[in-house]
Each structure stands twice: as C-alpha cells, then as structure tokens.
Amino acid sequence: MSRERNIKWLNNRHVIYRRDPINDIPTIETNLYKYYEDGTHEAYHLFNSRAKITTYRSLKWHFYVLHYLNQDNNIDINSVFEFIANKENGFVTFFISDKKLQDMIKDVFALSGDPPVNKKRKILFKDYSGLTPEQKMSIVGKLIGRSRRIDEEVIYQCMLDLNEYRQKITVSRIAGLLNCSARTIQRNMCDKLKKEKKLLNNEL
C-alpha cells in the first residue's frame, strides 16, 4: 500500500519547496495564472502533484533544489534530506542505503551554488485559483496555441502540463491542446520526447 506523502512535516519546519520566478517577468498575468511566452526556468514547484520520486537521479535533483531554496533559511537541511529519502514518509518509491544517501548529500553540498537545472515552464497557475484540472487544461490549450508553429518545445510544454494535472500523456491529448492533427504531433516528436513521455506517464 502506497503511503501518503507527509508534507506536513516540511510545513511545520518552514521548509521552502516552492518558488515562482524572481527575475523573469510574465508576458501575461491574471488573477488565475502567469504566462511566460518564452518560458522560464525559475519556477520551482516541488511536490506539486501526487507523483513520487522514483529514481536516484530525481531524488538528487530534489535535494539540489531544496538546498538552493533554503540556503538562507535557518533549518537543518540534512534532516530534511534524510526525511524525504525515507520511504516510510511517502516521498520516494524505493529504499536507499545510508551510505549512498550520505554520498548523495555530500555531492549536493559540494556542487550547490548556481540555480539547479530546471524544466522550462510557460504557464504557472496561482495557488487557490479554484480552477479544476479540466479548466486549467483548457487555458493551457489556448495559451500554448498562441505559438506560431508546432515544435518540440511546444509539445514538451504540453506534456509537462498534462503530467502536472495527473492526465496521461497521449498524442491525441497533445493534439487537442494544440488544435492540430495527431499526425502533426507524431511528426514533431523526436525519440527523446517519446522517452520523456513514457517516463512522465510512469510517474502517474
């Protein structure tokens, strides 16, 4: 039986795990969302969906982000890493040995400093918008559809948004969001995107 993620533990200790862009300016901002036409790498929204951490690589990236966001926060970040890595707390799907965990933490401290590499996002919905997943996806379709042509970046954005709102990524759903044919999507999906599509769907 899968354990519920114990996010309350982080909140009680005032751990920062979400941050909107601080330098990039949205092209459009409403009371519901921010839209970045050229995308932004500055949005860090950890634990935004129910998907759990399934790989060592993903766990390490989460550690990098947490260390970066909390570098000026007076918390014991080591205890945060150890809590998240404990499968009993509902954040990861696998067991990690203490030695491997400590080696991972050492790497994080040794290499941290610059902002962690992050996926580009174009649309950020505001907290407590009251929108249903279906309403959000409708907005995503309209905004992403502003793009002049269908390319790998646009398709990848749709994949990220579908994943965030717990929707299985299919060619037909992407085509529906972008108001184009499934054949157009298939023609513009490289092997890397196809692999990413499979990985994202496995997280659901």
Image: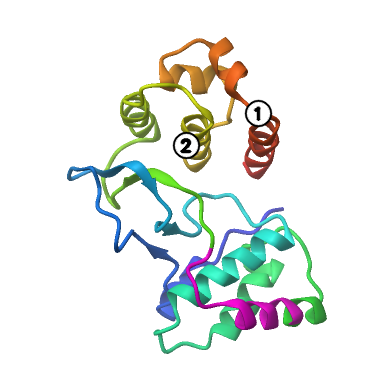
Residue 132: image location, x then y, percent:
35, 35
Residue 119: image location, x then y, percent:
51, 50
Amino acid beneath label 2: Gln
Amino acid beneath label 1: Cys
At 56% from the left and 79% from the top, the residue drawn is 80
Q: Quadrant of residue 137?
A: top left
Element type where label 2 sits in the image: helix
Upstream in sequence: badge 2 or badge 1: 2
At 69% from the left and 83% from the top, the residue drawn is 106
Q: Using the image, determine if residue 4 lies above or below residue 71.
A: above
The residue lying toward the viewer, choosing from 88 and 140, is: 140
Q: Is residue 58 left or right of residue 152?
A: right
**Dominant secondary structure of the magenta stretch?**
helix
Q: Using the image, determine if residue 117 lies above or below residue 71.
A: above
Q: State which region is magenta.
A: 103-116
Task: Identify the image quadrant of the C terminus.
Answer: top right
Q: Is residue 127 left or right of residue 179?
A: left
Q: Which mark is residue 157?
A: 2
Q: Is residue 194 magenta?
A: no
Which residue in the protein does label 1 denote? Answer: 190
The mark lying in front, picked from 2 and 1, is 1
